[in-house]
Image (spheres, rainbow, N blue to C red):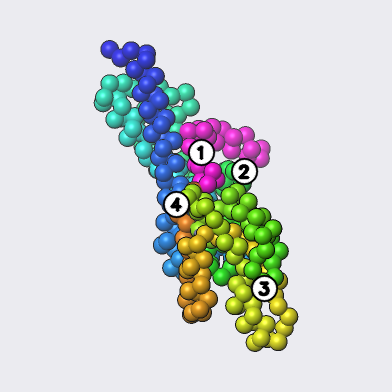
Amino acid sequence: MTSDSDRRERSWLYYIGIVGTGVVTFPSCLGLLQHLVFKQLHLSASMTLSPLLGFVSVATTGIISSISICVVSPVLKRFLHDHGTSINTDSNTHDDDNTDKTATPEFMQCLPVYGVVSAAVFKLFNGHFKSVLPSDLVKPGAFARESVRATVKYANSSQRKKIQSIGKQHGCHSCGRWLKVKFYIADHQPPIAIVLQNSKANRKPLQDQRFYPQCTKCAKKQRHCVSKPAVRKLVTHATSLRRYHFFLPLPLLLPPSTLQLVMDLLKPR
Ligand SMILES: [Zn+2]
């Protein structure tokens, strides 16, 4: 016989498994998109279309994560059942049985809702859609938030102080790293060499520049890019996680049966 405490413990294991599935799948898929799609197509966070591409990526990844939760749910229930108890969840991903229902029309109808809600939660946690794309080293990066006005000269002590403070808050503007970064370089954007080159070639005044915090690793890569203009190296940042990478287990919070009820109520009569 299974005691109540055993049952509660296994219910917790079920919830931890479901939440863990979303927590792992969501950032992993966004990271894969960066490496396998955006980097290969040379698409970066500084492009005009990047917020739209980011929105589509977050919504698609939200749908994939919701599907993975619904696939894992019956498997996890079966596993826990085989090891001693059945799981009674108050708001389940589906009904109370242990079958996979991801192919049902009811579930398929809910997928766009999961995509849009995932994008809304991403924004709610202060995420910028462009941030899911790689950074172009000669442009403000995926983590560029605040900046300091700059000239072609190097940063003075006051500007450097502000850059350290922005860096501590937002990390390196290119790769997003902040752990173990003790010092941020005040990075000119656009880089000085490019500004001088453009001004000379087009016979125009110097372009406005801003300082952004950058780690020494990215600064080194940037120097290489500027010295060899043919190289436009993109920096990926799949492991630079922020709170907006947290995925809420939507099928658990908004089960298909509830969404169907809302959709039925909203239908014009
Ligand atoms: Zn960096």
Secondary structure under tag 3 reads loop
Mark 2–mark 1 CB contact (< 8 Å): no
Gap in angstroms between the C-alphas marked 1 and 3: 45 Å
The residue beneath circle 2 is 124
Identify the amino acid type marked 4: Thr
Secondary structure under tag 2 reads helix
Can you tell which of label 2 and label 3 is closer to the viewer? 3
Identify the amino acid type marked 1: Leu
Secondary structure under tag 1 reads loop
Mark 4–mark 2 CB contact (< 8 Å): no
Q: Is residue 230 magenta?
A: no
Secondary structure under tag 4 reads loop
| Residue 153 visible to an observer of this rendering | yes
Classify mark 1: residues with Cα within 10 Å, few (<14), some (14-19) or many (20+): many
Q: Is residue 262 magenta?
A: yes
The residue beneath circle 1 is 248
Which residue is pictured at 37% across the width and 21% down the height?
9
| Mark 2 CB within 8 Å of ligand 1 | no
Identify the amino acid type marked 3: Val
The residue beneath circle 4 is 239
The residue lying furthest to the front in this view is 157
Mark 1–mark 4 CB contact (< 8 Å): no
